[in-house]
Amino acid sequence: MSAQPLLEVRDLSKRFASRESRDASLWVIKDLSFSVRDGEFLTIIGPSGSGKTTLLNMIAQIDAASGGEVRFKSESAPINDPKSLNPGLSCRIGYVTQEDNLLPWRTTLQNVLFPLTVQGRLNDETRARAAELIRHVGLAGFENHYPHELSGGMRKRASLIRTLVYDPPVILMDEPFGALDAQTRAVLQEDLLRLWEMGRKTIVFVTHDIGEAIALGDRTLVLSRAPAKVAGEHQITIPRPRDIRGIMSHPDFGPLYQRIRAQVQ
């Protein structure tokens, strides 16, 4: 990995007007700073209401900030003026949200190919990459199925590779597996790590699950309660490749879990 940050968040702040008073403001995030290296898998955890989704929305350029700066490859992104926002930063930032957001009238393959179609990049090479990703996540044979014909886990896989297929340098993920059962979540975590190992994309992954944060990440940031700041930073020393299902037995897991839990609480 390069020592130069690929993505930097500097003194980022976000406030919302108070419903009780026109003159009052509620700060959700204030003076939040961190950086992410090229190829790093960063996980972020924090208490409910700490602004994790708001943070990703600002980085993804779909919500304006009240202050601070986001830099991509040392280039300052336009985040403070809603009229200047550039969602996805010209396809350089992908975003996997909590909902799969598949288009119900499109098949699995059509959904996966959709961003390439919009970008005018659909050709034999990108079609081949889409087919490879579909095979890697176990969706081969379901290319012509519609979203309502797929399980929740299958829809999540389709949503994930729909973002990977157009190859953005940074991928933001907002609790993508949070609504799934434990067994399906473990399978998708394994899928995600296997796909990440293929291309070593820079990933910023928000979760409410401490175990998931440890299992997936190179490094974990703990956010404080609102207004959110970085309350803790933890390097994940468990070597890769990781056994998702057996990771709790690793000697580093328990002490790390307890340190993060103490900061989250």
Image (cartoon, grey):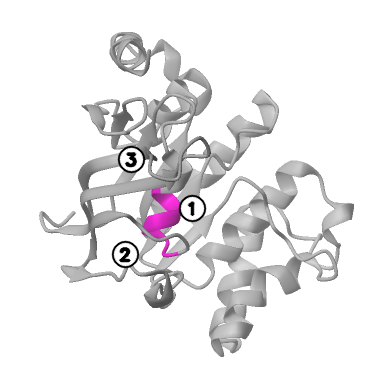
Q: Which mark is residue 21?
A: none
Q: Is residue 56 highlighted in magenta?
A: yes
| Mark 2 in CB contact with mark 1 (< 8 angstroms) | no
Closer to the camera in the image, 220 or 57: 57
Residue 155's place in the image compared with 255, above or below, is below
In depth, the one of 29 and 216 nearer the eye is: 29
Q: Quadrant of residue 141?
A: bottom right
Tell me what residue is drawn at x 35 percent, y 66 percent. Answer: 169
Q: Residue type at mark 2: give it.
A: Asn
Q: Is the magenta stretch mostly helix, strand or loop?
A: helix
- The magenta stretch spans residue 184: no
Q: What residue type is labelled 3?
A: Ile
The part of the chain drawn in magenta is: 55-61
Label 3 Cα neighbours within 10 Å, binned few <14 / some 14-19 / many ≥20: many
Mark 1 belongs to which amino acid? Leu
Horizontal and vertical percent position of residue 233? 22, 29
SS of the residue under disc 1: helix
Taking the image as drawn, is residue 27 in sight?
Answer: yes
Q: Which mark identifies residue 29? A: 3
Which residue position holds label 2? 80
x and y, in percent, of residue 231 in the image? 24, 25
Q: Earlier in the sequence, mark 2 or mark 1?
A: 2
Q: Badge 1: few (under 14), some or many (20 or more) residues near its Cα, within 10 Å?
A: some
Q: In this view, does 105 lie to the left or right of 205?
A: right
Using the numbered discs, state the Cα–Cα distance from disc 2 to disc 1 in whole angstroms: 34 Å
Find residue 195 and name its label.
Answer: 1
Q: In this view, does 46 lie to the left or right of 31?
A: right
For marks 1 and 3, the one nearer the N-term is 3
Q: What residue is at 30 percent from the left and 32 percent from the top?
A: 220
